[in-house]
Amino acid sequence: MKKLNQMRSEQARQYMLHQARDLERALFRYEFEDGAFSDVLTELASYQNEDGGFGHGLEPDLRCKESSALATTRALEILRLNPDHPERNEQVISALKYLEHSYMPERSGWDIIPKEAEQSPRAIWWQYGAFKDHWGNPNADIIAYFIDERELYPLESLESRIDYAVNYLKQSSDLKEMHELFCYLRLNERLPREQASEIVETLEAFMDNCISREPGSREGYGATPLSIMDSPNSPYFSKYQELLPLELDLLIEDQGEDGAWEPNWSWYQYEEVWPLAKEEWKGVLTLNALRTLRNFERIAGD
């Protein structure tokens, strides 16, 4: 079984400590070196706006300072890493308040990015109205975070929004867009058993449509089994168990000479800004890779 050897592991560590963004550096220290989660909260706060939402390039492909559902769900994903930390609640409440107030009844959901985003550098796919044909991204994800935090921030209309999300998946989704899949998988993990059982077959078909089982047939950006899990504790582990040894081998092989993992996509515009975003992504992706390899016991010496 291939493992990330000590030299390559140390290269990744050095990259995270000296070249990653301050936020990913704090996350690395928290997850791998007994760092303080309060340091993560301090760094994350620099991306939060007065309206409670997050922006300022927290999602490296979207550079606008304005709040977006996209960046706010990324922040809530980070805040979920330590749900019992007392200092995180203020950021969570502010973020959920922003989401509650930016809800659009005519869409039964949220815009993933604001109109103002088109005035800032961004990847070519981040036009206003992106993913409007795939309602689940970001809406299923947002509903999942309201479920997560229902005791801290009760949302009066939560049950009706859950029902809408379940019905949309069963009746309207084309089950082909991988980001919508990721959002629904996160929602599924938070649903009560009865509601989760309603969509289990639909999610199976969705995964089969989106997740490539053949590494040799992949070109560029796409979903793999490791896109939906970072540990053997995943509810989807058994579905892809036989494929994971090779997937983890390939993840180890994808490490760059500088110790980092890098994006396999480009912006196709704003070429003067893309190198900065690419470097920021390298910190995000390297942290994700190290987390996955650790959880699957693929780092030598762990």
Image (cartoon, rainbow, N blue to C red):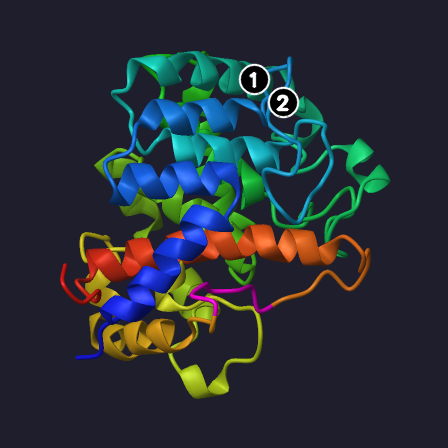
Q: Which residue is mark 2?
A: 103
Amino acid under label 1?
A: Glu
Residue 164 is at least partly visible in this image: no
Estimate how packed mark 2 is, as few (under 14), some (14 to 19) or many (20 or more) residues with alpha carbons within 10 Å: some
Instruction: Report x, y in % for residue 66.
Output: 72, 27
Would residue 237 appear left or right of 271 to someone viewing this image? left
**Quadrant of the rendered image containing residue 288:** bottom left
**Quadrant of the rendered image containing residue 155:** top left
Instruction: Report x, y in % for residue 294.
Output: 23, 57
Q: Is residue 153 magenta?
A: no
Q: What element does badge 2 sit on?
A: loop
Amino acid under label 2?
A: Tyr
Which residue appears at 29% of the width and 25% of the height? 83
Q: Which residue is mark 1?
A: 100
Residue at the extreme left of the image, as rendered: 301
* 284 relative to 245, above or below: above
Which residue appears at 46% of the width and 22% of the height? 42
Residue at the extreme right of the image, as rendered: 119
Which residue appears at 23% of the width and 76% of the height? 245
Instruction: Report x, y in % for residue 211.
Output: 43, 69
Per the picture, the main secondary structure of the magenta-coloured stretch is: loop
Q: Which mark is residue 273?
A: none
Closer-to-camera residue (178/176): 178
* 175 relative to 248, above or below: above
For the record, the magenta segment spans: 258-264
Q: Quadrant of the C terminus?
A: bottom left
Q: What element does badge 1 sit on?
A: helix
Spatial separation of the CA atoms under disc 2 and disc 1: 6 Å
Closer-to-camera residue (270/243): 270
* 49 relative to 122, above or below: above
Residue 224 is at least partly visible in this image: yes
